[in-house]
Image: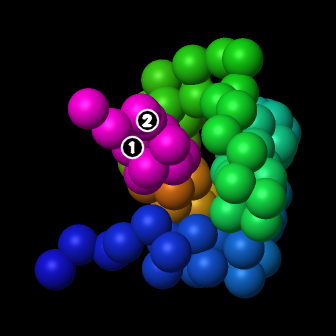
Amino acid sequence: MMLGFTDSYTLWRHLPFPSGGPGEGLALTRSDLAEADEYVTTVIRYVERGIFKPAPVAVLEMLQALMHRIDRLGSVATGGEQAAARSQHAYAALLHLVYRQFLEEGRPRE
């Protein structure tokens, strides 16, 4: 069973933003994750007011690239850095799911 739009949106809205971890690389990915999170907030306007207005950037591609960077950092990380990398990756994956479903939901029906 796949996670539906309402469920993934609800999870995202209640999930705390992940930490950056002790390393510089994860601090940078956290900053980029915050930027992506800001773009995904366009979904809130859709859910609360029915306004479908996608972000002006390629959010899904941004998140894909970010998840790859986090994976690379996580593969060489230890301890707290590895936990932070997993948390950031999971958050980015949830953002990707929410935004992809938002685009599907708001797309005009034929």
Q: Amino acid at mark 2?
A: Arg
Q: How many marks?
A: 2
The verdict on residue 16 being magenta is no
Q: Which residue is mark 2?
A: 107
Q: Measuring from the top left, give residue 10's x and y in whole percent.
A: 61, 79
* Residue 69 appears in the picture as rendered: no
Please report the residue visible at 72 percent of the width from the left and 17 percent of the height from the top: 56
Disc 1 and disc 2 in contact, CB within 8 angstroms: yes
The verdict on residue 109 being magenta is yes
Q: Nearer the viewer, residue 76 or 92?
A: 92
Residue 105 versus residue 72 in the image, above or below? below
Protein image colouring: rainbow
79 to the left or right of 93: right
Residue with the most extreme top position: 57
Figure quadrant of residue 81: bottom right
**Bounds of the magenta segment:** 99-110
- Helix, strand or loop at label 1? It is helix
Residue 17 versus residue 59 in the image, above or below? below
Residue 14 versus residue 104 in the image, above or below? below
Q: Measuring from the top left, give residue 83's x and y in whole percent.
A: 58, 71
Quarter holding the N terminus is bottom left
Residue 81 versus residue 73 in the image, above or below? below
Please report the residue visible at 72 percent of the width from the left and 82 percent of the height from the top: 14
Q: Which residue is mark 1?
A: 104
Please report the residue visible at 23 percent of the width from the left and 72 percent of the height from the top: 2
- Label 1 crowd bin: few (<14), some (14–19), many (20+), radius 10 Å: few
Q: Nearer the viewer, residue 34 or 76?
A: 34
Q: Amino acid at mark 1?
A: Glu
- Helix, strand or loop at label 2? It is loop
